[in-house]
Image (spheres, rainbow, N blue to C red):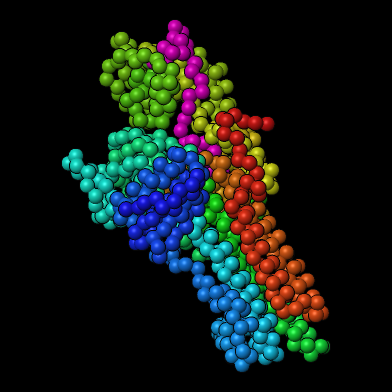
Amino acid sequence: MWQIVHETRGRLRLRLPAASTAAGALALETLPGVSTVRVNAACGALVVEFDGQPATRERLFARLQAADATHGTTLPAVLSEAPDDASGLISAGAWLLLRPLLPWPLRTLLSWFSLSGTISRGLRALAERGVCVEALDATALTIAALRGEHGSAGLTRFLIELSNYLEARTVRRADDSLRRLLHVRPQRVWIERDGVTVAVDYDTLQGGELVVVGTGESIPVDGSVVAGEALVNQASVTGESLPLPRNAGMTVLAGTHVDSGRLVIRAERVGDATTTARISRYLLDALDRPAEVQTVANALADRRVSITLGAAALVFLTTRNLRRVESVFLVDFACAVKLGTPLALKAAMLQAAREGCLIRGGEMLERLAGVDTVVFDKTGTLTHATLEVTDVLPLGAFDEDQLLALTASIAEHSTHPVAEAVVALAQHRGVPHIDHEAVDFIVGHGLHADVDCAPVRIGSRHYLETDEGISLAPLREQVQRFAAEGKSLLYVSRGEEPIGVFALRDRVRREARTVIRQLRRQGVREIVMLTGDHGERARAIATQLRLDRVVHDCQPEDKAALINELRAQGRRVAFVGDGVNDGPALMSADVGIAMPRAADIARATAGIVLLEDRLDGLARLHARSRATLALIESNFRIAVGANALILIAAAFGRLSPVAASALHNGTTIALLLRALAAAAYPSRHLPRSPTHDGHDHP
């Protein structure tokens, strides 16, 4: 059980059992409003800094109660919780403090002992990897010690160890961010059996069981709510900043948190099958894949080690001054480049994941930055894959509501998307239900039912005009107009006369036009839409969204062929899709991007997966990729330029070994912090998100 040791506004010091401190930290790290959590496992203390709001404080205590109830949590083995190794830094600092107090013979002996670790590390690196940074550092320290400059050698070693420690801490910050995103499994969960709530081991949980989750607890399964009501914070999974209401019939995801309320959830996916578990595997796999820019940067950095070696040899041959040689050996180009490039990519991928975009490796981020052509599949991507009624055209004695009421009363017996769209409109308008006889389903054509002893037929033009011999001449002019606008048509007749027609079309995503405009501003040259629809419908949507090109009546292999044709022209192509038939195109593109509801094959073949069912994330991710690559290039130029100046100054004797080491390592740390800052404060580097007001803006 935990207890409060000390409290001020926005800061708490808690005492927990030593075995529970790590679990307590994990329970609080992802809580909205909590900024930092620090652990002192030795004394069982936990220091929490938060926004000071009473609601956050209450959620914090509720989360700790939940952690107690589940007896801690476990992390994936890939992420170590071992503290940063500061032993080298501590020993180097201690030697600097003790050295003046020791007699000369002992001082010399202990100096060599203090340097032995760094020198042996350099020798091992030289044997394993050839001439490298560690070997250069070891050479510089050996020269200083041989010349009797033990004070300079000790201070230089301290600066090297300080730099190594700060670099490791900086990289660990990115790993900590990943740890917060990964799915952390509870050891025990509460389930409902025969009306009784009992705790069971998480590993024994089966699909179909009823899981009970209360305020402050994490949802451990993907499933549907069968009872209760709660506000659920999904920020860790979808990037949504505000908690959303969830009640019976709605779905919830593992890894999200109940801010307030209580839910009974029927488990549909558990363990490694949950959404967040799949996200974890995706991220871990992605972080192991080096981007081309990272590979190139490492190669350039390795080649520049030889520059340092050559400069040192030249200085020695021309001056015979070992102090200058030592200064030169302490300057290299590799550290900032080799560490800064993967750190920038990792930080960008993790920030993108927080915002609802999963990237399969730094290579995909790099490719996306260079994209000049974006190809969209239509259905489910630019549109919602659901139909909406745009026009209701009654004839004769019927008005709109009468026609809608009659049609919807019969159509509600069908699950066809056209019928569902008509029923949805009727429910929205609140029109009355019309009694009718039994409904006959004419496969591939439509519906038939008798109303007041008169036959009512609903369906395609072919059904009414060809099969039933009903003349649609009174609708011809309006039908031609609707067809020119790319709309689908549903005809209705009563007796032998047409009584109206419904015009429907795919519901275009309200953010689509804004996102397309933003992509153009970010350098995309051409935006193309591919669809299996007929020409009129496809062109109508293309005109509405102001696309550069539309290709209609496409088969799956046609989509892949077009992607390959564009790439053969030298284009760098991103393809956005969601269906099984989009798999070949996703694989053919430079960057394949899948929507969140995409078929399994689409998600498996895509390099990027959007977790929110919106296109906003695509434009923002494209901007982030460009900003990240620009940051990497900028850091590379700064690293090379700054270290070149330091190297020249050292070669001409303008810098002591200590000063050269301080300037070189300071440059490296500054560039690493710059890379992290780009992810920590993305709004300074990226454009605003497109507006969400539902309107197109010129």
Residue 34 shown left or right of residue 447 in the figure: right
Q: Which residues are magenta?
A: 376-405
Residue 76, given in percent of the width and then of the height, sits at 39, 61
Front in this rendered view, residue 270 or 2: 2
Residue 480 shown left or right of residue 181 in the figure: right
Q: Is residue 26 visible?
A: no
Please determine whether, in this image, residue 108 is positioned above or below residue 530.
below
- At x 55%, y 26%, the residue is 483
Q: Is residue 552 visible?
A: yes
Residue 355, given in percent of the width and then of the height, sits at 53, 47
Please determine whether, in this image, residue 243 is positioned above or below residue 679.
above
- At x 76%, y 73%, the residue is 646
Spot the residue most to the top: 397
- At x 40%, y 65%, the residue is 42
- Total number of numbered discs in the rendering: 0
Residue 327, given in percent of the width and then of the height, sits at 73, 80
Residue 369 is one of the magenta-drawn residues: no
Spot the residue most to the left: 194
Quarter of the picture holding the C terminus = top right
Residue 636, given in percent of the width and then of the height, sits at 69, 65
- At x 56%, y 30%, the residue is 694
Query: In which quadrant of the rendered view does residue 493 lie?
Result: top left
Residue 204 shown left or right of residue 107 in the figure: left
Please determine whether, in this image, residue 660 is positioned above or below residue 206.
below
Front in this rendered view, residue 650 or 656: 656
Residue 378 is one of the magenta-drawn residues: yes
